Amino acid sequence: MEHDYVIVGGGAAGATLAARLSEDPTVSVCLVEAGGDGRGILVRAPALTAAMISGRPKLNNWALHTVPQPGLNGRRGFQPRGKGLGGSTAINAMLYVRGHPRDYDEWADLGAEGWDWASVAPYFRMSERNQRGADALHGDAGPLQVADQNDPRAIADAFVQAAETLQIRRNPDFNGPVQEGAGLYQVMQYFDGPQRGERCSAAAAYLFPAAGRRNLTVITRALVQKITVADGRATGVLARFGGEDRPLRARREVILSAGAFGTPQLLLLSGIGPEDELRAHGIAPLHVLPGVGANLQDHLDYVISYTSPRRDVVGLNPRGLWDLARAGLRWRKDGSGLFATPFSEGGAFVRSRPGLDRPDLQIHFVVGIVDNHLRKIHLAHGFSSHVCVLRPESRGTVGLTSSNPAAPPRIDPAFLSAPADLGTLMAGARLMDDLLKAPPLAPWRGRRLYPHDGSDAALEADIRARADTIYHPVGTCRMGTDDMAVTDTAGRVHGLGGLRVVDASLMPRLIGGNTTAPTVMMAEKIAAGLRAGG
């Protein structure tokens, strides 16, 4: 099989690229995805993310793990990643957050010319169909439906009121002129038409409407084994599907959109990366690039949970499950109610200390108890609040565990390896603790899980015992011009023709927020460049 472009990975970036590039009927595109078609009820019903995120069982989820983390008492962290068309947009909380404009100006300062805020803002608007309509910051004609939550719990507004008691301003739009403050998240969810209330994954937004194009081929349940290279140029990939290895040839380019873990893994399997890492697994170096797999950054997250005497939050006891079942019937009827929830209904962006130029902490307020990625179940009704450090100084790596493409990558986020991250997270945990004790949440507040005496030593011990990712890994094939950069600012791999990276692994630095919207933006921007001949 031969196409102009072969795209590996059907997540936020891959789905966007495949749809945009195939708008040109003279161009043929093949998208290769290891998972399924991303159309099932588990994906479409927002509340059913709870059935997928834990990885028990592995439903649309790679369910990866880190190596033991010294900063977390030697624990192995859990890394859920979406497996199927839509990628992690098929299993996440659907939150639409762009980050702070200064984040993108910093990308440019770090050598990613053309990725400053003024340059990327048009592509955010291009991708978005916002329920509130268009303005200077938002679009109303893009593929990605961005909605106000259609039926948030009362406790979510109580969370915002609680924040106001701490002098944290109410913010109706985290993607508006000011990021700082507390409010309800907008979500990537259909707000009109027959799909109202369903998840609007990147595949649903971009790829499924393009499915009838004759120049677009989508292959699912196909694991790419390696990139094929001849005379210093990528010529295609070898993919295993239908029980055999099959070559997929690319006349123009191979584009890797397998994510911050999958993309460096595939480069390494193909002999592209640091020489010592390749030789350690018996792989002959084809093209030495020391930055492949370096610069891993992720948001480390700390959770406080409470049981609740009220039933208008989620509970996994018989009464709560009955409420969920009734909510499912309502959702099927009109797309509203508890089954439409992102769970992380409320949130806040705050500063850990005065004098910072932008928020360095993010809070996700969840209308149920979340413990260890829902892998530890509590039957009680309750709620949780999460806080993460938005711009960690810790840097980790991604490598190989084996030369077998079916083996998982080696993931080492090196959480809390930079001492400053612990201090910032502790400041965020104290602020969040005060917020959850504020009077507006009193009617819902029951018993706290994992209580401690509040001392610095006890808080640090609890963080090291329970903190983990909130699912935003980036940076492992970063773009730039220095010796550790893997690609140029258009995602082209340094020193190899016909090979490009387009996904969150390109980010030079982790942005201050959730990473789906920025990843879609990056794919929009690079697709526009490709269509213009870049």
Image (cartoon, rainbow, N blue to C red):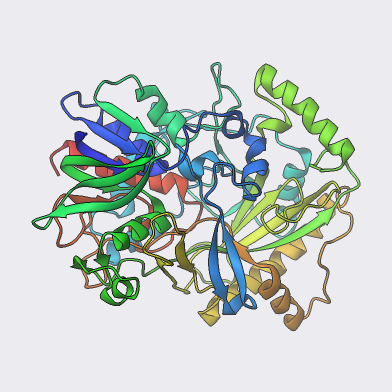
Q: Is residue 389 above or below residue 470?
A: below
Image point 53% across, 62% down: which residue?
A: 359
Tell me, yes or no, if residue 143 can be seen here: no
Residue 291, given in percent of the width and then of the height, sits at 29, 69
Res. 199 visible in picture? yes
> Quarter holding the C terminus?
top left
Q: Residue at x 56, y 53 (%)?
A: 63
Is 2 displayed left or right of 361 in the figure? Answer: left
Q: Quadrant of the N terminus?
A: top left
Which of the 4 quarters of the picture holds residue 71? bottom right
Task: Give the side of residue 277 with respect to residue 92, left or right.
Answer: left
Q: From the viewer's perspective, is residue 105 above or below residue 521?
A: below
Q: How many marks?
A: 0
In terms of image quadrants, where is residue 286? bottom left
Residue 239, position as x, y percentages in the image? 32, 44
Residue 423 image-quadrant placement:
bottom right
Is residue 172 toward the left or the right of residue 122 in the image? right
Residue 176 vs residue 120, the one in the foreground = 120
For the residue pair 516 and 70, the one nearer the viewer reads as 70
